[in-house]
Image (cartoon, rainbow, N blue to C red):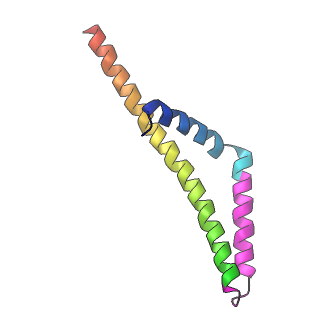
Amino acid sequence: MSTFEQRVHAASRGREVLENEAYQQAFADIENEVTEKWKNSPARDAEGREKLWMYLAMLKKLKSQLDTTLETGKLAQLEVEHKQGLMHRLKNW
């Protein structure tokens, strides 16, 4: 299991990706391209449509994983700050 600091660092790196305009545009472009190909694919091409659906599912999974990393890091940061506050209060007591 990772330490709080590792989770905070991973969240920071995840934020860099999620907030990066190039990433956001690339993600949107890929999602739109695959969605359009799926919409325009013939119904008889079940295998091709299934692959396109899988691409979309993996793309969403990637984004979900980055979002989860970001949220986990935020929680870890709060816990680190809480522990630091407790330590500070103990030292002053």
Identified at 72% across, 45% down, the residue is 21
Identified at 69% across, 89% down, the residue is 43
**Magenta stretch: residue 43 in it?**
yes
SS assignment for the magenta stretch, majority: helix
Classify 76 as above or below 40.
above
Classify 74 as above or below 39.
above
Q: Which residue ends up furthest to the front in the rendered image?
A: 1
Q: Quadrant of residue 50?
A: bottom right
Q: Quadrant of the C terminus?
A: top left
Q: Position of residue 85 (x, y in %)?
A: 35, 20
**Magenta stretch: residue 79 in it?**
no
Identified at 59% across, 66% down, the residue is 57
Q: Position of residue 30 (x, y in %)?
A: 73, 62
Q: Quadrant of the N terminus?
A: top left
Q: Which residue ends up furthest to the bottom in the rendered image?
A: 44
Identified at 46% across, 38% down, the residue is 74
Q: Position of residue 4 (x, y in %)?
A: 43, 33
Q: Quadrant of residue 64?
A: bottom right
Looking at the rendered structure, the number of numbered marks drawn on it comes to: 0
Q: Which residue ends up furthest to the top in the rendered image?
A: 92
Give left or right: position of 44 versus 81.
right
Classify 41 as above or below 26.
below
Classify 77 as above or below 33.
above
Highlighted magenta segment, given as a residue range = 25-46
